[in-house]
Amino acid sequence: MSIFTQEVSAKNGQSGNIKQMLTLEMLPELKSLLSDSVEQQKCIDGILTLWIDKIELIPALKLLKTMPQPFDLLLDLYGVDERLRLDRDKLPAQDFTLVYQLCSISRNQDIRLKVALANDQADIPSITAFWPSANWYEREAWDMFGIVFNDHPNLYRLLLPPTFKGHPLRKEFPCRATETEAFSLDDERLAIEQEALKFDPKRWGMEQSNKDNDYLFLNLGPNHPSVHGVFRIALQLDGEHIINSVPDIGYHHRGAEKIAERQTWHGFIPYTDRIDYLGGVMNNFPYILAIEQLANIQVSARVKCIRVMLAECFRILSHMLFFGTFAQDVGQLSPIFYLFIDREKLFGIIEAITGARMHPSWFRIGGLAQDLPKGWDTMMQEFVDEFPKKLDEYEVMVMQNSILKRRSIGIGQYNTQEALDWNITGAGLRATGLEWDLRKARPYSGYENYDFEVPTGHKGDAYDRCQLRVEEMRQSVKIIQQCINNMPEGEVKADHPLTTPPSQRSKHDIETLIQHFLNVSWGPVMPKGESCFAVEATKGVNAYTIISDGSNTSYRTRIRTPSFAHLQMIPKMAKGLMVADLIVILASIDFVMADVDR
């Protein structure tokens, strides 16, 4: 078994948020299954990474999913176009790489399997038989790279229109509109596009009638208040009962992963804010941590504490909006007005600290944009003192409402194993009774120093998913209070040449002036390597995987968002229920379409 390493190695404990390093020797069943030609890649994030032949993929995944303490969560599945990579000669890759990242909840460990594919043989077996959640991930890889998944139930465009030509994440596909011909839409093409929009039930395995009756097909969305964004669900109905449903996404797709290939490492930070646009700096968190892990940048205790405090503020902001809209979708209008008043107060504090409200883009590589202003603690303390009392009132108003209880208890219910099969994380997973929160399981940014609890449910239904987020807001307030009481002193910018912007000593000597000029104009050049970092975001596990070939831009940035996986489960959750129940299910998922489509 040959082993190769990348130029950057783990230093000073910078091994990502993986609790314990996994080695192939710790998986003797897998080691005996794989051939001697398997190659092991040493990555900065510490995840066991194996290059295997595609004929070994299905046996390996089947073993990993069924072994004792299984790797039961398909955390991510994505492609990489390796053809223009500067360090390609150091990899066993051919033209494309397919990456399968699995997580074992019981082991608290990850494993990453990579399969190299040639351009003229870019096909591989589908794994939807093992993880139903692989359906959309495989469709996305085909959509973006043109990789064919044999035996896939319906390999069809996912994020792009069915008439779209090309595969955008291939390197030959242009990044900018100025590199393409001017857009035009004549009558003939308009007719083709309109025809392509029509819903064909047979494509999705739906019959238009049976021996007893004819089914009704109904479009819910993409312009409908209850779908929380540009999101469409095609429903097959028998009366008001849902026989089947097809979620249709992609209306909000902006090509964030493609944009990351042309922006500097620092310049891409504002784009992360627009992924889960309700998460604010929570979106910066995994991206910044992945880069700092790659470049071995150590930040001060003060930076860690401020980041945690601001992240928890945005967790509260996101959950407040969820709480209000959940009640609104069920039919209770008053709570959202009260909650918006409190959101405005907290946004005022965010604006006083960062200079912006929803999208401050305030985290920086190696630190923060600036230090906390004078009086920040007074403002934050006032909110911490007032909000819990109001939250108690809102909880009685909403969660004890008899109508809301009847409409949400037992609706959209699933168990822990079903949640893992469908790649559910965050409150949706914890509502089934599984206590899995990365802030506890894999602490980052000093979360191990905070005293807080991880709320769990037991039914896994819409009511539990709402109740959990109420409890999570209380825990976030508890964490913020500890930040106020124990805010460390220290610098808010690491003394490292790759921080952005670099040290202010540039005004005193020519070397740091040159460094400052290059980092600001061209962007910092990150070391070669691969780094994945995951955080417990507002809606579940949000992870960034960045691949650097030693330039001032990312060669590949993969954004793993929770909402993308969560919407896949809608057909299973809604089957047999009524349309009114589907609205409750959608409200309880807590998704953002920008988080889905990216």
Image (cartoon, grey):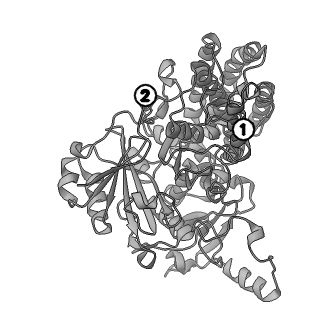
Q: Image quadrant for the C terminus?
A: bottom right
Q: How many marks?
A: 2
In the image, is 1 to the left or to the right of 427? left
Q: Tell me where residue 200 appears, x and y as whole percent.
A: 60, 79
Q: Is residue 425 visible?
A: no
Which residue: 65% across, 63% down?
A: 250
Q: Tell me where residue 429 appears, x and y as whole percent.
A: 47, 42
Compared to residue 527, the image places residue 63 above or below, namely below
Q: Is residue 87 visible?
A: yes
* Closest to the observer, 275 or 470: 275
Q: Which residue has dot 2 on it?
A: 12
The amino acid pointed to by label 1 is: Ser
The amino acid pointed to by label 2 is: Asn
Which residue: 61% across, 19% down?
A: 302
**Please, what secondary structure does the residue beneath circle 1 have?**
loop
Q: Image quadrant for the N terminus?
A: bottom left
Q: Earlier in the sequence, mark 2 or mark 1?
A: 2
Circle 1 Cα neighbour tier, 10 Å, few/some/many (<14 / 14–19 / ≥20): many
* Closest to the observer, 290 or 336: 290
The quadrant where residue 307 appears: top right
Q: Nearer the viewer, mark 2 or mark 1?
A: 2
Residue furthest out toward the top? 485
Compared to residue 309, the image places residue 568 above or below, namely below
**Please, what secondary structure does the residue beneath circle 2 have?**
loop
Q: Which residue has dot 1 on it?
A: 361
